[in-house]
Image (cartoon, helix red, strand yellow):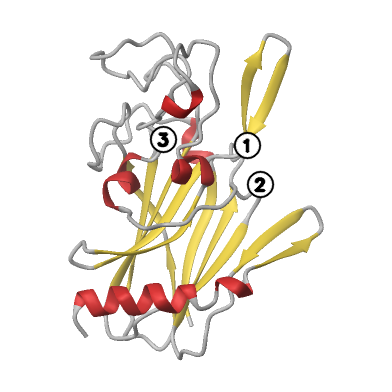
Amino acid sequence: MSVSNMKHAVILSTAAVLSALIWAGCGSSKSLVMVPDHTDRYIVVSVEPGEKFRHPMKVMPLVTVRNPPQMAIWLETIDGVYVETLLLTRRTGEQSWRKSPDDDISGSEITRPEALPVWSARGVDASSAATPKSGFERKTSIDRTADLVIWLEVNHSTDFNSAYPQDAVPGQVGYSGGPWGSGQPSLIYRADLETAMTAGRTELNIIGHGSPDGTDGLIYSSLEGITDARSIVGHAVAVME
């Protein structure tokens, strides 16, 4: 199957099961479950929240909210050809950002290129959903004839530290979009999926970070200066079934 046909088949397969999207609750946690159509191969992606999954953000002097992160999970071929987005949080997908006290433009004009710069440079034609507030699981059917790469990108707003300070200015090392930018940059996780396997469990591991100010879609391998952002995601696994 050609790459273009494979992409078309995967997107159609996922579209066919959107009506089966359900929320399953267990105690205080919830799982996002996508039931696959009739295929003999699919993957299950599970993400468990880390200690810093919800980040405190002061929006007014006496008001602090605890935000879940922006997140994207997507598939590519082993050669780097985009296939499908499995999960994309709504604010990134719709570019519907909250207006901050320092913004002198309308809400519809606000962009946050630093949020998920790697996905933004690669992902196309993706629908979005509200950010999961806890751990979740996603299923999708796949083409059994091609090896794939699964990517996860995750980021918080105003997650500042000494390497990525709130008062950094454009052009300065550590600038991440201003006083309401991301602070620490997006973290990138990757796992290679050998679809010829009858079954398998693969850990998604951190391999680098995205552009701090969102000026490009490159992946930077150094994790120097990254502190508590490493604890946004506690555990991420892809299981072939």
**Residue 107, relative to residue 70: is it above or below?**
above
Q: In the image shown, does 124 or 61 lie closer to the viewer?
A: 124
Percent position (x, y) of residue 50? 59, 45
Q: Secondary structure at mark 1?
A: loop
Dot 2: element:
loop
Rendered view: 40 above or below 18: below
In this rendering, does residue 181 appear at all? yes
Q: Report the residue marked by disc 2.
A: 133
Does residue 162 appear to the left or right of 56 in the view shown? Answer: left
Q: Residues within 10 Å of mark 2 (few under 14, many from 20)?
A: some
The residue at 82%/58% (across/down) is 27
Disc 1/disc 3 C-alpha distance (Å): 15 Å
Q: Residues within 10 Å of mark 3 (few under 14, many from 20)?
A: many
Residue 91 is marked as none
Rendering coords of residue 3 (x, y %): 21, 75
Residue at image point 51% right, 40% down: 91
Q: Position of residue 164 (x, y in %)?
A: 38, 20
Tell me the distance, in whole angstroms, between the alpha carbons under discs 2 and 3.
18 Å
| Residue picked out by circle 1 | 54
Q: Mark 1 and mark 2: span between their CA atoms?
A: 8 Å
Disc 1: CA contacts within 10 A as few (<14), some (14-19) or many (>=20): some
Label 1 close to label 2 by CB (< 8 Å): yes
Of marks 1 and 3, which one's residue comes earlier in the chain?
1
Residue 115 is tagged as 3
Q: Nearer the viewer, mark 1 or mark 2?
A: 2
